[in-house]
Image: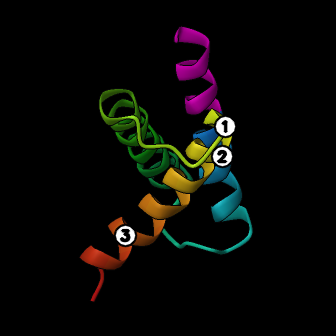
Amino acid sequence: MFPTLIGTVVIAGIVGYLSEKTSFTRNGILPSIIICVGGAFLFYFVSLMFGISFGAPGINAIIASVGALIIIPTHWRK
């Protein structure tokens, strides 16, 4: 459980960093990483509680991070 949680954080951080470097988002590097890690944490614990999964934990982390990047910034932007 603990190595999966650490891997989720690392993968989410990489996704957040790459999203800024490829101009997928315009939030800034640190906010994008925080958004990705938060979304990945949320999905990790929801998947533990309810058994929802897309496959491997790494795939779950990537999908949750990208989903958080799409949902969060567009909600607050005009």
Q: Position of residue 71 (x, y in %)?
A: 37, 69
Query: Which amino acid lies under the numbered mark 1 shown in the image of this protein?
Result: Ala
Nearest to the eye among marks 3 and 1: give it: 1
Gap in Å between the C-alphas at discs 2 and 3? Answer: 18 Å
Marks 3 and 1, how far apart in space? 22 Å
- Would you say the residues marked 1 and 2 are in contact, meaning their CB atoms lie under 8 Å apart? yes
Image spot of residue 24 (x, y percent): 63, 74
In the image, taking residue 1 as reference, residue 18 lies left or right, namely right
> Distance from label 1 to label 2 (Cα)?
5 Å
Q: Which residues are magenta?
A: 1-10
Q: Earlier in the sequence, mark 3 or mark 1?
A: 1
Q: Is residue 44 magenta?
A: no
Question: In the rendered structure, are the residues bearing label 2 and label 3 in contact, judged by CB atoms less than 8 Å apart?
Answer: no
Q: Can you tell which quarter of the image residue 44 is in?
A: top left
Compare residues 3 and 56 and report the one nearer the observer.
56
Identify whether 31 is placed above or below 41: below
Residue 74 vs 8, above or below: the answer is below
Circle 3 residue:
71
- Give the residue number, with chain letter if any, for mark 2: 59
Q: Secondary structure at mark 3?
A: helix
- Of 9 and 78, nearer the camera is 9
Front residue of this view, candidates 40 and 45:
45
Coloration mode: rainbow
Three-letter amino acid code at the position of disc 3: Ile
The three-letter amino acid code for the residue at tag 2 is Ile
Residue ID at (55%, 30%): 9
Q: Is residue 20 left or right of residue 2?
A: right
Instruction: Return the x and y of residue 66 as percentages of the image width and height.
Output: 55, 61
Q: Which residue is mark 1?
A: 56
- Furthest toward the front, the residue is 51
Tell me the residue at 53%/10% (across/down). 2
Q: Give yes or no for contact between labels 3 and 1 (Cβ–Cβ under 8 Å).
A: no
